Image: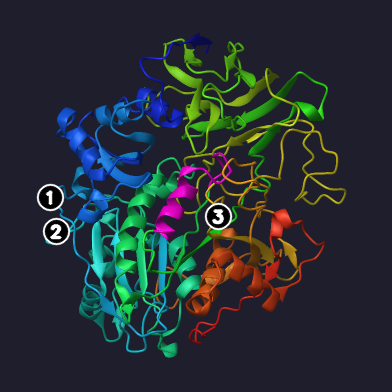
Amino acid sequence: MTYDWIPEAGDGPAPIDAVTFTRLTYGVSSVPDTAWWSAMIELDQTSIAEFQQAVAQDFPQDLLVPAAYDANDRAARPERQFVAIFARRALVDVLNRHGNGYGVVNVHLGLVTPADWLNVDAEPQTVPVAEVAVDTVVTGMIDDGLGIAHELFRKGNGSTRVDYCAILPTPPDLRDVHTSQGRAWNARQIDSLLQALTWSGFLDEEQFYTETGQIDLGAGKFSPLSLQRSHGTHVMGLSTGYAPVADVTTRPIICAVLPPRVVEDTSGISLLPSLCLALQMLSKRASRFQSGGRPVPFVLNFSYGNFSGPHDGTDEVSRLFEQFLAADPAQKRWMTLPAGNGNLARSHGVIAFAETDRSEIELSLRVLPDDMTASHVEFWMPYSKAKTPRDFVSVTVTPPFGPESATVDAKKGQKQTLRDRKGQVVATLLYTYEPAPTARGVITLAIEPTASLSGDRALAPSGRWKITAKQRELSPDKKIEVWIRRDQTLPGYRPGGRQSYFDNGDYQRFGPFGRPLPVDPPDDICPVRRSGTLSGFADGSSPMVVAAYTEQSRQLSDYSAAGPLTETPMSPTPFREGPDAAAKADQSDVIWGVLSAGSRCGSYVRLNGTSVAAPRVARLASEHIGNCEHSAREWLAHAVQEAPFDLADKPAHTRMGQGGISIPVEWTVGPKQG
């Protein structure tokens, strides 16, 4: 197979988001123009109502704003706001252009949403107030495969503690006129179904999850709840699970189930629209729980992460979380996030010419065969206040069995495509600019899958892709931060993505005794780094970010990602150096993971990762948020001192934050009041 790089001039205004541009331009030829795409947009000094009105003049049939946004939401005109929408391709393509005229300054494309998952006639709802006890704390979860019938989510009388569950990946119940995507269940409906499907004390769980829309084996739809172990159920058990014998009534649960196809895309590219919608739906429900006329506190756990993004706290996800946490000023809201599991993934590189006398630095990207998902590498330029940012570096790419590309500079309009002998695009190298508050340019290398079950899909070559960065106007005190987007297959999901990684020969993987090195060696000159691998979702100022430790060895788990963040323009120093604390995620090097709820009643299974460390902190936080006058992160720093778990080898602050914390999980004991 022969390949050629072709320079391409920009067609019209420059695209806002490079990944959205490449997906719409080269990756969706088989998708009809009438299909509905989920998308998350960012509006600049524009209300939702103004945006709808402007779009209706040019694209009257191509926009659906979910009913989760009520009249007040649509009229509000904050300086910036993220909004989940459904739109057709023509509209998304226009919105993803600078100067689009609709007030949109950011676009992130999700996935095609089946028309039968949408209720286009749904209308906003006024959520009724629920008067609750003064010591009530609302607990929230956004995840996949939530086994809401598990006994850990029941009261002493067998009724559910789940007050609200939004199941996005299912056709709507047309009797529910207030839900635009999927199906929403309240406690009364869940209890009614539990009673109807219980015979001789045993619940028909297969039928229960079929009725609620999480399992549909007849349609061939995959659900994590079809497996013995589901990520969402396990995590929710740790954060807010109590056995019926504890008879807990002060921890109502509100939750949202993400579509498996979105979760399956571990890059996070497809996740943002569904996450944005889920946060909006839960935000409305959380505010309804009141005591004495004021909303009670709310603790939300979200155990997802990714590798990419600017890693400076200005990314869309970090700002989306800040928007959610501040949505109801009368309600105290805390959030827990995992630090990420990418410490040893070789997904992060640093281009710094001050550390070497070379004028160019090479990164070897290993793209694996049988990878059915696209691979993306992002070169993030330093922050620049200039209207026209400096040309910091130039990048060239040499694929396996192919020629070196022409130079792509950090300048507007720079773009190269790699085409096979049929003229199909198999890779794109282009420069885009991420507007304020990020205010950084990014050169993106987007590589098509190396395998496909479709005979007409353009395939990229697997093997070693040589990426060369050459110094242009990069000052000695500045760095280019490089990240590979995450795209490996999650456990239990159908095989698809295989994670690309940097494969430089001077990267030292192992120590003198053959154990993987969890930190960069001293005076290391390799551009591939373990430092700076903190999840791209965990860079904001307010959420509590939790690393993972192994209990028996008293060491941080090797996979637990680390800071620091990139220097940010939003404050003199970054919002954080790394995680805030570390919690238990593994019992030992041999007995990995921790026990929590399985997919079926009475079952308990093991999972590990920072995803299971974060909900332990959420569990403890729900006991203290009501009486704490400090911020979430300040409280956690104090909690570490109250219940320390001493870690061996004294890890750096950028890996463990304030230190290890001991948080026992006792299913049969109700929550304590801090």
Report the residue marked by disc 2. Answer: 177
Query: Of marks 1 and 3, which one's residue comes earlier in the chain?
Result: 1
Give coordinates of residue 245: x percent, y percent. 43, 90
Q: Tell me how far mark 1 sits from mark 3, CA to CA.
A: 38 Å
Report the residue marked by disc 1. Answer: 121
Would residue 261 appear left or right of 485 to someone viewing this image?
Answer: left
- The residue located at (42%, 16%) in the rendering is 424
Badge 2 marks a residue whose secondary structure is loop
Badge 3 marks a residue whose secondary structure is loop
Q: Nearer the viewer, mark 2 or mark 3?
A: 3
Residue 312 inside the magenta-drawn segment: yes
Question: Which of the 4 quarters of the picture holds residue 130?
Answer: bottom left
Q: Tell me how far mark 2 sits from mark 1, CA to CA.
A: 7 Å
Question: Which of the 4 quarters of the picture holds residue 524?
Answer: top right
Query: Of marks 2 and 3, which one's residue comes earlier in the chain?
Result: 2
* Magenta region: 306-326
Disc number at residue 541? 3
Q: Residue furthest right?
A: 512
Give amino acid for label 3: Ser
Query: Of marks 2 and 1, which one's residue comes earlier in the chain?
Result: 1
Would residue 500 appear left or right of 19 to someone viewing this image?
Answer: right
Give amino acid for label 2: Val
The residue lying toward the viewer, choosing from 646 and 478, is 478
- Residues at circles 2 and 1 in contact by the CB criterion of under 8 Å: yes
Badge 1 marks a residue whose secondary structure is loop
